[in-house]
Image (tube, rainbow, N blue to C red):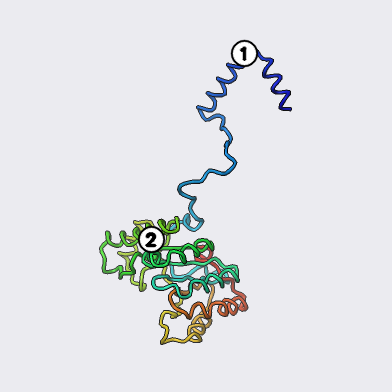
Amino acid sequence: MKSVLQKIWQALPAEIRMEIVLCGFLLVIFGIIQIPSLFAHPLVLSHPPEKAWQQIPISEKEIIHGDTSKKQVIFTFDAGGSDASAQEILQVLAKHHVTGTFFMTGKFIEANPQTVKDIVAAGSEVFNHTYDHPYLTTLDEASITDELSKMNATLKATADIESGPLFRPPYGDIDSRVIAAAYKAGYEAVYWTVDARDWMEPSVTADEVKSNILSNISPGTIYLMHVGDSITGSILDEVFTDIEAKGYKIVSLTQGL
């Protein structure tokens, strides 16, 4: 087929061929015809497309639970200290085919860059927990915005993703002024329905944390757990198994809203 076309082309008068080439050139210039890529590999973008969770709409209100019409619950993991349970959490999430949801501080990211990359590579959702975990109600609007933007810049520099559009206030310390300032900066506040209290280690036992989770289960529950203690990593598989046995599905935050 190619040789036939070549013969036809060569048989055309030179002036006709020149006119065809000129017309084709003008069509490309004006964008009517697109030239296919000449490269075997796809073009690498300097800024990859946003993750699906980074495109969800936000509102100026605080999220305290997920969709209560579905028999599902949400586990969120705050990361502001060590990464003691990080690998165990990732293993359990993978075993149960659950998308993780993590709220990270900028300082955690700086201290644990490989852990952050592992979490992102696993496909987990990563949201903003401020840069250095302050009491936001003590800060002015500019400082609140700076806490969020600095964490976001740290995450982007480490894992090349953005931290929006959700954030969790450190200590759950929030008021209407903080919510408004964060919303203005492009973030919606996320609280929780049940605090597992794993962060109270060693004054709380693994059995007590597990009981606190399982005795407070209902559709749409958002559980608060932490990456920095050892309890979460030790009980999470058993907790997930027990919850699934009750007929509940475990979903990520954006899947469960």
Residue at image coords 46%, 47%: 46
User: Going by the image, does 36 lie left or right of 228?
Assistant: right
Depth check: give the residue in front, 212 or 175: 212
Residue name at image x 58 percent, y 20 percent: 21
Q: Which mark is residue 14?
A: 1
- Which amino acid, by three-letter code, is at mark 1? Ala
Give x and y (percent) for residue 27: 54, 25
Which quarter shows the N terminus?
top right
Image label count: 2
Residue at 58%, 16% in the rendered image = 18
Residue 3 drawn above or below residue 79: above
Compared with residue 211, is residue 32 higher up or lower down, i.e. above or below? above
Q: Of discs 2 and 1, which sits in the foreground?
A: 1
Q: Residues within 10 Å of mark 1 (few under 14, many from 20)?
A: few
- Residue position for label 2: 60
Q: Helix, strand or loop at disc 2?
A: loop
Question: Would you place residue 75 above or below residue 201 in this image?
Answer: above
Q: CA distance from mark 2 to mark 1?
A: 68 Å
**Residue at the spot x=30%, y=70% of the render?**
135
Helix, strand or loop for disc 1: helix
Identify the amino acid type marked 2. Answer: Glu
User: Please, is residue 113 above or below residue 203 in the view?
Assistant: above
